[in-house]
Image (cartoon, grey):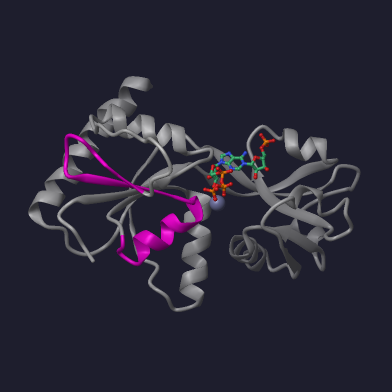
């Protein structure tokens, strides 16, 4: 069900939410995020903000339910691969990379273990929340491994005896260090990105998107 109002999905609560809200506010969109609402109407433009779990954003775009979304490339690529494998719609347009949400998806091993390269991971069990991205990387390297899917506490899996290695997001490296792990391979460098659904937009929505993009360009340049 499409509406005349531009629908933008952003993370409700988490590492991307504050910077997303600030970005759209600086682009001149006025809104008030009070309470627990899922949809917030902008006060000065025909725009609705949808506040959701970040995991839902790629699917909302790929199913054409919302027009724009902000999401980490790690999540976007993982969901895209998963949907492609299931023959579900997985198309979208990347409008621009943003200046926040920086992290890397890395494989990490016991800090006392000798590590010389991906072949050392042969036959290992790797705990991760990103099974598709890990599989893509390991396939590219021609190295066989066993997955261990965890939606949380990935970094404790080796110590808990659940896995030999992990693949998780890293920013400062403090979490790896606190868990006796060291970064072995970076498999993806990620930032937050603005994405758009594919398909037709009416003339009004299209020009609104262009206006937002022009303002965003100015906002991001002013910060550099
Ligand atoms: O509730 P919801 O599902 O919406 O949120 P979430 O818990 O799934 O995601 P959230 O808010 O934690 O992260 C959202 C996005 O922020 C991620 O998908 C990344 O694109 C980006 N991002 C940037 C990060 C990090 N940096 C990050 N450091 N996401 C997670 N981490 C975690 C990482 O998983 C590990 O536990 O931080 C820890 C490592 O940090 P360092 O600094 O110790 O290395
Ligand atoms: Zn999430």
- Residue shown at the point (66%, 57%) measured from the top left: 151
| Left or right: 101 in relation to 62 | right
Q: Nearer the viewer, residue 107 or 17?
A: 17
Residue 92, position as x, y percentages in the image:
34, 60
Q: Quadrant of residue 11?
A: top left
Judge by depth and name the residue closer to the eye, 137 or 11. Answer: 11
* Quarter containing the C terminus: top left
Please report the residue visible at 76 percent of the width from the left and 60 percent of the height from the top: 126
Q: Position of residue 145 (x, y in %)?
A: 76, 68
| Extreme residue toward the bottom, this view | 87
Q: Is residue 104 left or right of residue 207?
A: right
* First to last magenta residue range: 39-65
3 and 76: which one is in front?
3
Q: Residue furthest left?
A: 203
How far from the left and from the top, in percent, is residue 73? Answer: 48, 50
Q: Is residue 160 left or right of residue 2?
A: right
Q: Residue at x 49, y 51 (%)?
A: 53
Residue 106 on image: x %, y %: 67, 48
The residue depicted at 43 percent of the width and 32 percent of the height is 19
Q: Is residue 136 visible?
A: yes
On whether residue 99 falls in the magenta region, the answer is: no
- Is residue 99 among the parts visible in the rendering? no
Q: Nearest the camera: 5 or 210? A: 5
Q: Is residue 89 above or below residue 121?
A: below
User: Where, quadrant-wise, is the N terminus in this rendering?
Assistant: bottom left
Side of 166 relative to 93 (left or right): right
| Residue 145 in the image: above or below residue 72 | below
């Amino acid at each position: 069900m499409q509406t005349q109002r531009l629908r933008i999905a952003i993370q409700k609560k988490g590492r991307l939410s504050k910077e997303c809200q600030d970005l759209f506010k600086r682009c001149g969109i006025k809104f008030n995020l009070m309470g627990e609402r899922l949809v917030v109407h902008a006060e000065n433009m025909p725009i609705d903000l949808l506040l959701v779990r970040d995991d839902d954003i790629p699917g909302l775009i790929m199913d054409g339910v919302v027009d724009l979304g902000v999401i980490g490339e790690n999540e976007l690529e993982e969901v895209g691969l998963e949907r492609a494998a299931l023959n579900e719609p997985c198309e979208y347009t990347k409008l621009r990379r943003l200046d926040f949400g920086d992290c890397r998806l890395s494989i990490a091993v016991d800090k006392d273990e000798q590590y010389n390269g991906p072949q050392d991971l042969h036959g290992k069990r790797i705990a991760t929340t990103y099974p598709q991205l890990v599989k893509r990387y390991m396939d590219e390297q021609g190295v066989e491994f066993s997955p261990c899917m965890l939606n949380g506490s990935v970094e404790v899996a080796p110590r808990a005896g659940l896995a030999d290695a992990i693949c998780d997001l890293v920013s400062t490296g403090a979490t790896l260090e606190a868990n006796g792990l060291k970064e072995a391979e970076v498999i993806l460098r990620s930032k937050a990105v603005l994405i758009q659904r594919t398909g037709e937009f009416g003339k009004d929505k299209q020009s609104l998107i262009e206006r937002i993009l022009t303002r965003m360009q100015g906002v991001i340049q002013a910060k550099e």
